[in-house]
């Protein structure tokens, strides 16, 4: 394994999947009028960026 490869645990992939699903659900929710709507999907995207960062994952192909 070289220094560029980052191994992600099963728990990490599970958290990523849950946060992506949360983002999809929260993208459907918004408050406000037709002129200005505020959504909540940025919460899940922010958590993904905070915990996992801009990491290029190299997962093995089966």
Image (cartoon, rainbow, N blue to C red):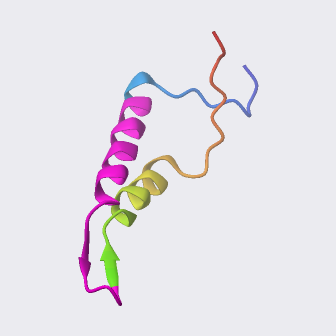
Q: Could you say which quadrant of the image residue 21 lies in? A: top left
Q: Is residue 47 above or below residue 13?
A: below
Quadrant of the rendered structure where residue 32 is?
bottom left
Q: Is residue 54 left or right of residue 16?
A: right
15 lies above or below 40: above
> From which residue to which does the magenta span run?
12-36
| Relative to 4, 22 lies left or right | left
In the orientation shown, which residue stands out farthest toward the bottom?
Answer: 35
Residue 27 is inside the magenta segment: yes
Task: Say if 52 sits above or below 62 in the image.
Answer: below
Q: On the rendered image, what quadrant is the C terminus found in?
A: top right
Judge by depth and name the residue closer to the eye, 5 or 21: 21
Q: Residue at x 62, y 31 (%)?
A: 6
The image shows a total of numbered marks equal to 0
Q: Quadrant of the N terminus?
A: top right
Q: Position of residue 26 (x, y in %)?
A: 29, 58
Tell me which secondary structure the magenta stretch mostly adopts.
helix
Q: Tell me what residue is drawn at x 40 percent, y 45 percent.
A: 20
């Amino acid at each position: 394994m070289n220094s560029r490869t980052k191994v992600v645990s099963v728990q990490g992939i599970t958290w990523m999947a849950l946060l992506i699903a949360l983002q999809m659900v929260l993208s459907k929710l918004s408050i406000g009028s037709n002129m200005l709507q505020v959504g909540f999907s940025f919460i899940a995207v922010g958590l993904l960026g905070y915990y996992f960062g801009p990491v290029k994952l190299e997962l093995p192909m089966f």
